[in-house]
């Protein structure tokens, strides 16, 4: 949740990313391909384990893939931090939210990186970050448009007030901006900052208020599933006891692992249908589909 408030630009560091002690990872020539192959092998090994394959080497392959993905991640996260700070400075958008978007883009880049194309990972993740952080468009929804000229006018107003020893106020801003031949409206727009709602509450003396904790969606929707889907989800995710693998569930439900895997996909899709839609309407549609399948 965010609140838009007028704050003097350059005086308050709201929504800034704290200094992070990130590992400085440099990929040597040819290391991109080695790490990418390790990530691919780890994902495939993890899939085989999920399918119930009993091979003592598979866990080691999975661990190797995770270490390779971690090296990719540190390279991308450092780039995401740099790009987020630059975009926040140029656009006035929340730095921490841009950094979160950048980290999501890095994760997507790791999953989609193809070393066979002959592109370095840093180049590949650069393209993902540039597309994701080019304008931060999603963060502008419902917020006033602030141009670079507006932010420049606000910074000049702050410097002028500091030089004259004036207290920060709208009237002081209008006075110094008018004296410099700039637009007071532009300076006021440039002073709008996106701050955390917690910061806004603290500034109004309402910091003692709190939010009720949200403990999740709840599991009552399981009663709307057909018994086979309900039983499978309970076993798979440990909703009524210990979580089970697909191979263990296949033995319990007396079916093949491939059949259980198909049932799992159907059960998850049915659960998403119930949770995403209006409960009564979604249940009716699901019941009709389940009856048609038999």
Image (spheres, grey):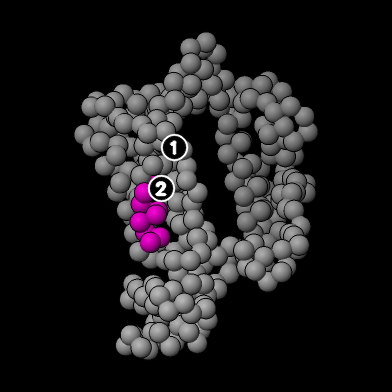
Looking at the rendering, the stretch of residues picked out in magenta corresponds to 80-89
> Viewer-proximal residue, 181 or 16?
181
Which is the main secondary structure of the residues drawn in magenta? helix
The numbered dot on residue 81 is 2
Q: Nearer the viewer, residue 257 or 131?
A: 131
Residue found at the very far left of the displayed protein: 118
On the rendered structure, is 254 left or right of 137?
right
Quadrant of the frame with the C terminus: top right
Of residue 246 and residue 100, the one placed in the foreground of this image is 100
Task: Point out residue 184 in the picture as x, y percentages from the top left corner.
Answer: 41, 86
Q: Is residue 212 visible?
A: yes
Indicate whether residue 87 is drawn in magenta.
Answer: yes
Within 10 Å of the Cα at label 2, are there few (<14), some (14-19), or many (20+) other Cα atoms? many
Residue at figure coordinates x 40%, y 60% from the top left: 88
Write down the residue under mark 1.
22
Q: Secondary structure at mark 2?
A: helix
Q: Position of residue 76 (x, y in %)?
A: 37, 40
Between marks 2 and 1, how big is the CA–CA gap? 10 Å
Q: Label 1 near label 2: C-beta < 8 Å? A: yes
Residue 27 x/y as whole percent: 30, 29
Q: Residue 5: x percent and y percent?
A: 55, 73
**Mark 2 or 1 closer to N-term?**
1
Tag 1's secondary structure? loop
Q: Nearer the viewer, residue 260 or 93?
A: 93
Q: Residue furthest top?
A: 56
Location of residue 181 with respect to 225 vertically, above or below:
below
Q: Residue at x 62, y 50 (%)?
A: 272
Q: Is residue 192 magenta?
A: no
Q: Quadrant of the image for the N terminus? A: bottom right
């Amino acid at each position: 949740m965010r609140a838009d408030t007028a704050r003097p630009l350059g005086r308050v560091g709201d929504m800034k990313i704290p200094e992070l002690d990130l590992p400085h990872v440099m990929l040597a020539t040819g290391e991109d391909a080695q790490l990418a192959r390790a990530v691919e092998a780890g994902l495939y090994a993890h899939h085989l384990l999920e399918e119930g394959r009993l091979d003592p080497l598979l866990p080691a392959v999975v661990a190797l893939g995770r270490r390779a993905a971690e090296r990719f991640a540190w390279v991308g996260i450092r780039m995401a931090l740099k790009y987020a700070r630059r975009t926040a400075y140029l656009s006035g958008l929340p730095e921490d939210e841009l950094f979160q978007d950048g980290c999501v883009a890095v994760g997507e880049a790791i999953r989609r990186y193809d070393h066979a194309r002959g592109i370095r990972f840093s180049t590949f993740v650069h393209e993902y970050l540039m597309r994701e952080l080019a304008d931060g468009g999603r963060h502008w929804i419902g917020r006033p448009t602030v141009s670079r000229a507006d932010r420049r006018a606000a910074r000049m107003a702050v410097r002028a007030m500091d030089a004259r020893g004036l207290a920060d106020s709208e009237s002081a801003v209008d006075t110094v901006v008018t004296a410099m031949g700039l637009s007071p409206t532009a300076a006021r727009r440039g002073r709008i900052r996106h701050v955390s709602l917690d910061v806004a509450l603290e500034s109004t003396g309402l910091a003692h208020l709190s939010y009720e904790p949200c403990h999740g969606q709840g599991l009552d929707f399981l009663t709307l599933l057909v018994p086979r889907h309900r039983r499978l989800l309970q076993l798979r995710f440990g909703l009524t006891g210990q979580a089970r693998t697909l191979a263990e569930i296949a033995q319990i439900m007396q079916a093949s692992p491939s059949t259980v895997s198909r049932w799992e996909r159907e059960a998850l899709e049915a659960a998403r249908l119930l949770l995403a839609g209006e409960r009564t309407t979604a249940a009716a549609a699901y019941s009709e589909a389940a009856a048609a399948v038999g």
